Image (spheres, rainbow, N blue to C red):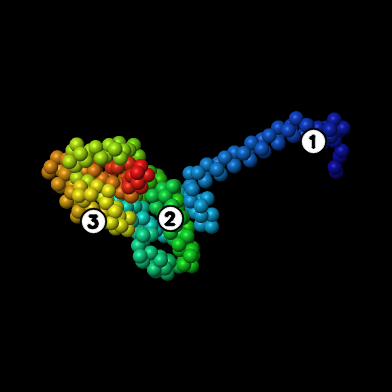
Amino acid sequence: MFTRPPLRVARQLSFQFPSHSTRGLMRQVIALFALTLLALSAQAEEEFPGRRQYPAVEYIELQDFYQKLNEEKIVAVDVRTDYEYNTLHIKGAVNISLTSDTFIDDMKILQGMHKDKKLALYCNGKTCLKSYKAASKCRKYHINDIVVYDAGVFDFAKAYPNDTYLFGEVLGDPSRLIGKDKLLSHSISIPEFEEKILQTNGIVLDVRDKQQRDGISIFYMRERRASLDRPDLIDRYISQAKKRGVPLLIYDQAGKQVRWLQYYLEKQQVPSYFFMAGGIDEYFKTL
């Protein structure tokens, strides 16, 4: 039989409305939480600009990407150039370069082969927009079930080195990745680059592809052209530089392609090489 508790106990059990000061503290906590969420969102937008610029494109985080890859629920698609892919890529990834003339046809074929899976596109890193541009292009041609892994190959390689390939072999040790510091140590300003040409009589290489080059030459009669899809030419000039004891002086379009060439130069133990910081884009800004 239910019995009524003593009055003193009943008062203790009764609901206590928060005091004015407590309600104020709660509002402050809620406001602080909301500001924290906004700050994190702004940080994510700054760190991953593609998410802001391509809001209609679905993206996937690193751990989720890795898990779904292992569960064979997605197919990893590397949309970078063949050269970048052959240098460093995620295990099992299919290479369909965004710059290829057959990009859309190849993507349609791949989707047809994996109708029950999403195609997860990736490129170099958080600020590289190739994967988002590729996804947007796919949507335009009605290729659905597309998702972007926008942390890129470098973050994946650092987290999962045993599932990453460097020059066709398991990376294994993340320290084998070339950091930005080492890239910067071989990057020199345009005046320094021009001075090196005069002082060392080094071999000047334009490693841009044909589309980027478009007949423009900035070191007339001094440079050789050896795009990254021509390793035979790269090897020829590496051999000449070693034999003559002069440096390789290399430039690209925007100072980004040389990052991948650096892996090969280090592998070939090239003793002296320099990159023109910012590439030809920076060169024209100074004119």
Q: Nearer the viewer, mark 3 or mark 1?
A: 3
Q: Which residue is mark 3?
A: 230
Marks 1 and 2 in Cβ contact (< 8 Å): no
Q: Which mark is residue 151?
A: none
Estimate the x, y position of residue 71 in percent, counting from the top left: 44, 57
Label 3 and label 1: CA atoms lie apart by 76 Å
Q: Name the secondary structure under disc 3.
A: loop
Q: Nearer the viewer, mark 1 or mark 2?
A: 2
Q: Residue at x 31, y 38 (%)?
A: 189
Question: Foreground: 20 or 96?
Answer: 96
- Regarding residue 191, the answer to whether it shows in the image is yes
Q: Which residue is mark 1?
A: 17
Label 1 and label 2: CA atoms lie apart by 53 Å
* Amino acid at dot 3: Arg
Say left or right for 181 vs 149: left
Estimate the x, y position of residue 70 in percent, counting from the top left: 42, 55
Q: Which mark is residue 131?
A: 2
* Amino acid at dot 1: Phe
* Amino acid at dot 2: Ser
Say above or below: 137 vs 170. below
Q: Quadrant of the C terminus?
A: top left
- Regarding residue 175, the answer to whether it shows in the image is no
Q: Earlier in the sequence, mark 3 or mark 1?
A: 1
Which quadrant holds residue 122?
bottom left
